[in-house]
Amino acid sequence: MVVELFLDLLSQPCRALFIFAKKNNIPFELKHVDLLKGQHMTEEFDKVNALRKVPALRDGAFTLAESTAILLYLSRKFKTPDHWYPSDLQKRARVDEYLSWQHTAIRAAGCKVYLSKVLLPLITGKPFCPEKVERAIEELNVALKQFEEKFLEDKPFIAGSEISLADLVAVVEIMQPVGAGYEIFKPRPKLAEWQGRVEEAIGKELFQEAHEQVLNAKSLSVAELVPELREQMACMLLKLIN
């Protein structure tokens, strides 16, 4: 049975799911949920995910929220290659370790950079606040240092010699501030080499397809967003970055 994936590729977790499903030839129907138009806040989407967030999955009558849970569900349901979520206890623990850490580290900091420098100015029509961006970059630099020293170390990939879900989730998170114009890889050759290996393992064409929107911020538009919703989203984004 074809599963339905409710995604907006502007979102890091959505990109991870999109790449994982396509790379593993998982039969799915893409249901685009436009975050900038507030489609995740509609009553229709509420029936799929009462949390009103993307990504979300619907498999027949079964629905599921949270990207990590969806990735693991798909890997088990479609029996994807072992390297994605290794059967080896310690390798799997390394994947679990990163997936547990990333929410409040690289993802949170990278998201703040993108929201502060790209989305909030787009929605409010006001220039970004340099102080907020600088604080977010400082947080991101700390997280990236921890990533290199603790999770990557001197290994090709986080769990060893092959790509895993941890690498996939990490790379889409790291690409978010790249889309905001922040230079991540030039001063970090080890990180750049890892990113190259991950992109190669995913496939350059698929990697670029998934990241086209986030890397082309100039194409974003909120012209069709109603004023009330625009104000609501601006308040929500301010809470996330403060």
Image (cartoon, rainbow, N blue to C red):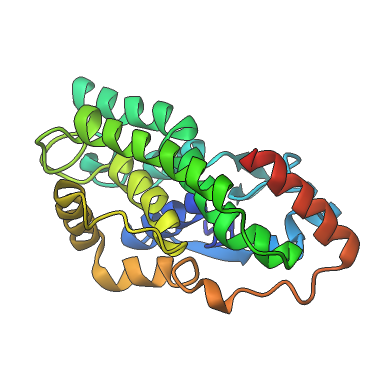
Identified at 14% across, 47% down, the residue is 190
Q: Find residue 186 and report its horizontal and vertical position in percent.
A: 22, 58
Quadrant in the rendering for residue 218: bottom right
Is residue 196 or residue 120 the one in the foreground? 120
Q: Find residue 144 and report its horizontal and vertical position in percent.
A: 31, 39
Identified at 19% across, 54% down, the residue is 192
Q: Find residue 210 and report its horizontal and vertical position in percent.
A: 42, 66
- Which residue in the rendered view is the most extreme toward the front? 131
126, above or below 48, in the image? below
Quadrant in the rendering for residue 71: top left
Q: Find residue 200 and report its horizontal and vertical position in percent.
A: 18, 62
Identified at 50% across, 40% down, the residue is 135
Is residue 131 or residue 183 the one in the foreground? 131
Identified at 80% across, 69% down, the residue is 225
Question: Is residue 109 in sight in this rendering?
Answer: yes
Number of numbered discs overlaid on the protein picture: 0
